[in-house]
Image: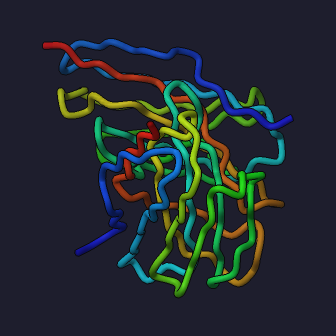
Amino acid sequence: ETGVTQTPRHLVMGMTNKKSLKCEQHLGHNAMYWYKQSAKKPLELMFVYNFKEQTENNSVPSRFSPECPNSSHLFLHLHTLQPEDSALYLCASSQELAGGPGSTDTQYFGPGTRLTVL
Amino acid sequence: GESVGLHLPTLSVQEGDNSIINCAYSNSASDYFIWYKQESGKGPQFIIDIRSNMDKRQGQRVTVLLNKTVKHLSLQIAATQPGDSAVYFCAEKSYNTDKLIFGTGTRLQVFP
């Protein structure tokens, strides 16, 4: 496998279910991201992990819970979601330099998980 | 506030013609810009990037132009092919943040 992979590619769940999305990057990067992509809206950044530490939580509801056990894997745990949470969830990774903000941030994306909440 | 916008939601071009996709940004602190291509059912794919100390950068069949005076970014695709049909996003980042800000996207349709 190369690049950024995501599983599952499609997920249908009820509002009372608990599920998890998985992302794995094979690029040797040290930063990973979760984005939400809804129709006719810009990509919305949800979470950022840099060197395995969460550095950004973009006012995301607590029904979304990220987990980053190491720099190659990222999970998004879902529980009691709402129908408006239906969207394409994209994972990305990048190599962040230790110099902090201003480091080049070319993010490489996975194929996404198409989530439908019934 | 920060915003990245695209002038046209849909662009239709004939195969073989050149395509130009435009993007405006409002944050004068932005110093890094990226163009992504997203095909149906796939995640965004990196195409080309440019830093604010440059005004032009060329790749394979693609050229990005940056006009900092009017805060405008464009992507030029030479000899557009059916495989270029996709949604194209611009994204920008400021020197004082690690966040990428994305535009809403322009759909490029290539017809024979």
Residue at the front extreme, as displayed: A16
- Give me the residue at 76% from left, 47% from top: B30
Camera-side residue: B9 or A8?
Answer: A8
Q: Residue at x 65, y 52 (%)?
A: B100
Q: How many marks?
A: 0
Q: Position of residue B90 (x, y in %)?
A: 55, 38
Q: Is residue A83 visible?
A: yes
Q: Is residue A3 left or right of residue B30?
A: left
Q: Which quadrant is home to the C terminus of chain B?
A: top left
Seen as rendered, the residue at the extreme left is B112
Residue A93's place in the image compared with B101, above or below, is below
The vertical placement of B2 against B107, above or below, is: below
Q: Position of residue A114 (x, y in %)?
A: 37, 45
Q: Is residue B53 visible?
A: no
Q: In the shown orientation, is residue B1 left or right of residue A110? A: right
Q: Residue at x 67, y 45 (%)?
A: B101
Rendered image quadrant of residue B70: top right
Q: Position of residue B37 (x, y in %)?
A: 39, 40
Compare residues B34 and A17 and report the one nearer the observer. A17
Q: How is the image coloured?
A: rainbow
* Quadrant occupied by the N terminus of chain B: top right
Task: Residue B19: give x, y in percent of width and height.
Answer: 36, 22
| Residue under the image location 62 percent in, 44 percent down | A44
Left or right: where B20 falls relative to A42:
left
Q: Residue furthest right?
A: B1
